[in-house]
Amino acid sequence: MKKYILALDQGTTSSRAIVFDKKGNIKSIAQKEFTQIFPKPGWVEHDALEIWSTQAGVAAEAIAMKSIEMEEIAAIGITNQRETVVVWDKNTGKPIYNAIVWQDKRTADYCDELKVAGKSEIIKEKTGLVIDSYFSGTKVKWILDNVEGARKKAENGELLLGTIDSWLVWNFSKKQKHITDVSNASRTLLFNINTMSWDDELLELFTIPKSMLPEVKQSSEIYGHTKSSFFDCNIPIAGIAGDQQAALFGQMCTKKGMVKNTYGTGCFMLMNIGDKPIVSKNNLLTTVAWKINGKTAYAFEGSVFIAGAAVQWLRDGLKIIRNSSEVEALAKSVEDSDGVYFVPAFAGLGAPHWNQKAQGTIFGITRGTTDAHIARATIDAIAYQSMDILKAMEADAETTIKELRVDGGATVNNTLMQFQADVLNTKTIRPKIVETTAMGAAFLAGLAVGFWESEEEIKKIWQIDETYKPSKKREKIEENIKGWYKAIAALEYWAK
Ligand SMILES: Nc1ncnc2c1ncn2[C@@H]1O[C@H](COP(=O)(O)OP(=O)(O)O)[C@@H](O)[C@H]1O
Ligand SMILES: O=P(O)(O)OC[C@H](O)CO
């Protein structure tokens, strides 16, 4: 009898496997960190074979841990760090270079050249993205240009490329399936989100042979079965989505206008914009959310680079807390930040400001400022940065958002969640199961094999843990928000 779905969450720093039952409860969970490789400043790589071995290892571990029978697993769903890309030899199955990670900036100068050459418009129109080293396309070009013999092999049809989902399926299927899903394809700079196919003009621009590309599939369908030695029976692999899109699905933001925000190291906010790939006028990305039963859903996306990482800086840099969890008590010990504003632009400012030169700055310090005010200003900054993105989304969608669904490690912080509701003047909702990324992948796989019959059935699994309602002290909050905008303006002036 089929009792479970196995979700594989291949993240930037660890590989995780979670077994869910039919009610969406977690039956077992296993996790393993893997090596981060920094060959030069600004370069970030992963060993693709280590990604594969840790991912397969935790999958086996999660199953063994609770003595689950292979026959009890209805399907596998995969969700992954996005944009990170692997190029491997079709015959040997071995990567020809380490995976180049989404954070890697080695192609930044080439991206600037493309901007100067006036390619921004066409790329935005076709892919919904901006020209940036973040996305996979320029990373693949770098491998072909810099690994000895790679370009020739690629032209001979001997090399394959894939985002991490693609690499995992290739290995799980014993080199039988070279596929990806639409949500991952939409992060490569090579995929046209209007025609929903690889784009010949972009492939020519980035000099990438078409023969390297995986076949693009829906996000919920049976792609193949596990054949790996880690599994002694054939389990259908039936769901794939990039991690942020999977979280959007896991939060059941399946209707146009619904928004989720994930609060981790940074924040990733996605808004379901329905079945049309609208181009943002407010510096957001347009991305494919998923394709299910032949229907494509799109999303606006904006990210905050430094969110929980600012709390880590209070811990490791300023040393005013010992654990991230202590920040809430310290921040709550004062009524407010007493006019202190902290813009944690350690890595520049992301959407909608997109200022690479901005630096972290604290404003409004007086003789009376204490560590508690700084802690409070840090929490506030996470909420303000997310507010800036949500406001851009509202402007683009010409609508007012009714609720924000939240997940990620920092959502345990009730003070942050309440302040988020206050500055947005919108309900902020935290669900009972905050493993929404893995949950989304499980839902996609479960739908494909009939483990869950419909989205309606799944919606009953998603349940609210806590709703934060906006405070009534609107005037004071509006004043505080004005201060934030002044801080951003001053920071941008300083960065010039
Ligand atoms: N109580 C808290 N308040 C604010 N931030 C927190 C709290 N607890 C953890 N964090 C932050 O959340 C982040 C970890 O969340 P997680 O979802 O695991 O992130 P990621 O997936 O990006 O590694 C860390 O940056 C940490 O500082
Ligand atoms: O692995 P995460 O959670 O850091 O997510 C990475 C994102 O998908 C990058 O776009």
Image (cartoon, rainbow, N blue to C red):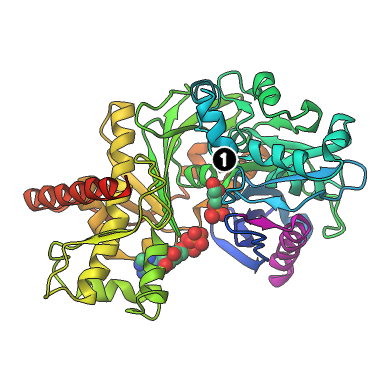
- Considering only vertical position in the picture, is 207 above or below 132? above
**Camera-side residue of 104 and 466:** 104
Which stretch did the figure color magenta? 43-68
Residue at 61% from the left image edge and 24% from the top image edge: 294
How many discs appear?
Answer: 1
- Considering only vertical position in the picture, is 326 above or below 437? below
Which residue in the protein does label 1 denote?
109
* Residue 241, image x, y percentages: 60, 42
**Camera-side residue of 54 and 96:** 96
| In-image side of 129 versus 428 (left or right) | right
Q: Residues within 10 Å of mark 1 (few under 14, many from 20)?
A: few
The reply to whether residue 1 is visible in this rendering is: no
- Characterize the magenta stretch by its predominant secondary structure: helix
* Residue 116, image x, y percentages: 51, 28
* Residue 320, image x, y percentages: 32, 79
The amino acid type of the residue labelled 1 equals Asp
The reply to whether residue 173 is visible in this rendering is: yes
**Quarter assignment of residue 258:** top left
Question: Which quadrant would the C terminus be assigned to in this image?
Answer: top left
